[in-house]
Amino acid sequence: MLLSRQGITLTIWMSVFTVVITIIIALRFFAIRVKQRALRPDDYMILVAYVATLATEGLTWWGIANGLGAHTQELTMDQIAVQFKILLGVGFTWLFATVFCKLSILWMYVCIFSIKPFRMAAYVLMFMVSGYGVAFICVFFTNCTPLDYPWNPVPGGSCKDVSIEEIASVSVNMVIDTAIVVLPMPVLWGLQLATRKKIAISGIFSLGLLVVALMGWRVQITVQAVTQADFVYGLGNIGLVTHLEIWLGIIIACLPTLAPLFSKYLKPVVSKARGSKRSTGQRHLKEAQNTIGGGGDSRSFSKKNWVRLDKEQALLELEEGGNFSKAEAMVRSTSSIEDEEAWRTQPNAIGVRSDVRVYGESQKR
């Protein structure tokens, strides 16, 4: 077994994303159960894409065990033969994964939007995706004559340049994926939805542009001189980008279907947290409004025990967390400067006069 650094890195990526897409697929079908709807064609299509992705990963692990990502001159003839077999097998499994992922997204569009022109456009794209898949199956089958020529060469056999079909395949994919991203945008922004919801949904659909960017990166790697001169080493870089395309495609296809889970489980938690925060803010506001005194040593009291004032004098007690503050209050039938001056000299007191003027002085502890 020959393990290269690129092979080990690719193994880590595959291990992580295999878990991620498996969880995403499981959540999709759990959301279907929560919503209590029947399975649709797009649900079956994404399952086909998932199985094809697992097959792609299985072939890639076989390649890693035989030196995928190492320099070609370090491999034996048997290991090089394995790389050619993997290249052919992964071509088919990757094609099935990406085609059925696209078809799943387009069928979901048809289920979401009922506008006839939009549906016709979605059906046209489905036809194009299906045609792309059939065409490149034929290309992969006819790339070499005979088919096993790369690992079992015979006189008179030959193979076409793999990089040419790679660039052609990726270029068509980029056009189709861009069309899939753009297709729902005019309809979406014409709906009577809040702007923030339109932005959120547009953001989910626009994640497909990440796949388009990855395809552009893949073309760049394919045409690099080092990839042309050392194809087994170049397969390590191409393999990572190829897997990222189908991993992200599955995630993007499943995200819109998880809405029932967000509504049932996540939204109540967020609403409760916001309500708790709002309640805390309102309580603080009330405490501030109930502050006794003024200036630098204001106090707030969560509980107020009111005592009826008589004609002469009464004692008002205010409770705050078990600590008591006393404020003497007096009602006078007449007002005078002497009364006001008398109350100003009393510590921690509130004076109430018949003209509804309140004055007092707080004492710092």
Image: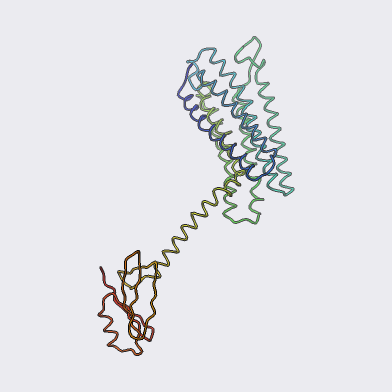
Query: From the image, which quarter does the C terminus lie in?
Result: bottom left
Residue 212 can be seen, yes or no = no
Q: Position of residue 149 (x, y in %)?
A: 63, 14
Q: Position of residue 90 (x, y in %)?
A: 60, 24
**Does 283 appear above or below 316?**
above
Which one is in front, 340 or 234?
340
**Does 68 appear above or below 276?**
above
Q: Position of residue 268 (x, y in %)?
A: 54, 52
Residue 149 can be seen, yes or no = yes
**Does 260 appear above or below 325?**
above
Which one is in front, 225 or 149?
149
> In the image, 326: left or right of 150?
left
Say which quarter of the image contains residue 159. top right
Number of labelled discs? Answer: 0
Extreme residue toward the top, this view: 155
Q: Residue at x 48, y 29 (%)?
A: 12
**Does 13 appear above or below 365?**
above
Q: Position of residue 248 (x, y in %)?
A: 56, 37
Say which quarter of the image contains residue 111. top right
Q: Residue at x 52, y 51 (%)?
A: 269
Colour setup of the view: rainbow
Which one is in front, 249 or 279?
279
